[in-house]
C-alpha cells in the first residue's frame, strides 16, 4: 500500500461547503501564525452556547491540521476546513 502524504490544503467539495451551517460567529485571525488562531478559537468558544458554530478565517495553512487536532482534544466538532482564495475557513461547533 503506498504511503499517502498529508497535505496542508484540505478539500471540501462544493456540496460539502454548501452544507456547512451559517456561523454564529466569524473569527478573523488573518495574518497571525500558530498558535494564535487556536488560542483565539478557544477564547471565543467560552462565550458561546453549546451548538453554536464558529468560522475561523486564517492565512496560516497550519490551521488545516491544527484545528481538527484541537477539536479532537477538546471534544468540539470540527465541521470542515477549506481553502477560500488566500485564506482558510475552518468551521467548529461547540459541544459543551
Image: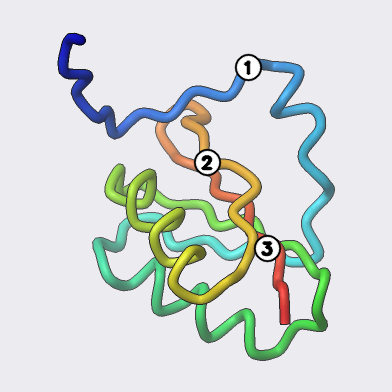
Q: Which residue matches tag 2?
A: 81
Residue name at image x 71 percent, y 63 percent: 93
Residue name at image x 82 percent, y 70 percent: 51
Instruction: Identify the mark nearer the N-term, 1 or 2.
Output: 1
Residue name at image x 19 percent, y 23 percent: 5
> Does residue 59 lie above or below 4 as drawn?
below
Labelled disc at residue 13: 1
Q: Are marks 3 and 2 in contact (CB under 8 Å)?
A: no
Q: Residues within 10 Å of mark 1 (few under 14, many from 20)?
A: few
Residue at disc 1, secondary structure: loop
Instruction: Identify the mark nearer the N-term, 3 or 2.
Output: 3
Q: Residue furthest top?
A: 1
Residue at disc 2, secondary structure: strand
Image coordinates for residue 41, horizontal then vertical, percent: 51, 73
Residue at disc 3, secondary structure: strand
In this orientation, which residue lies closer to the viewer: 28 or 73? 73
Side of 92 where 52 appears, left or right: right
> Does residue 82 lie above or below 64 as drawn?
above
Q: Which residue matches tag 3?
A: 54
Amino acid at each position: 500500500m503506498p504511503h499517502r502524504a498529508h497535505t496542508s490544503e484540505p478539500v471540501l467539495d462544493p456540496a460539502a461547503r454548501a452544507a456547512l451551517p451559517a456561523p454564529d460567529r466569524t473569527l478573523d485571525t488573518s495574518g497571525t501564525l500558530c498558535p494564535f488562531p487556536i488560542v483565539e478559537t478557544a477564547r471565543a468558544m467560552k462565550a458561546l452556547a453549546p451548538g453554536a458554530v464558529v468560522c475561523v478565517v486564517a492565512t496560516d495553512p497550519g490551521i488545516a491540521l491544527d484545528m481538527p487536532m484541537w477539536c479532537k482534544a477538546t471534544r468540539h466538532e470540527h465541521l470542515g476546513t477549506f481553502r477560500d482564495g488566500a485564506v482558510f475557513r475552518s468551521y467548529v461547533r461547540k459541544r459543551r
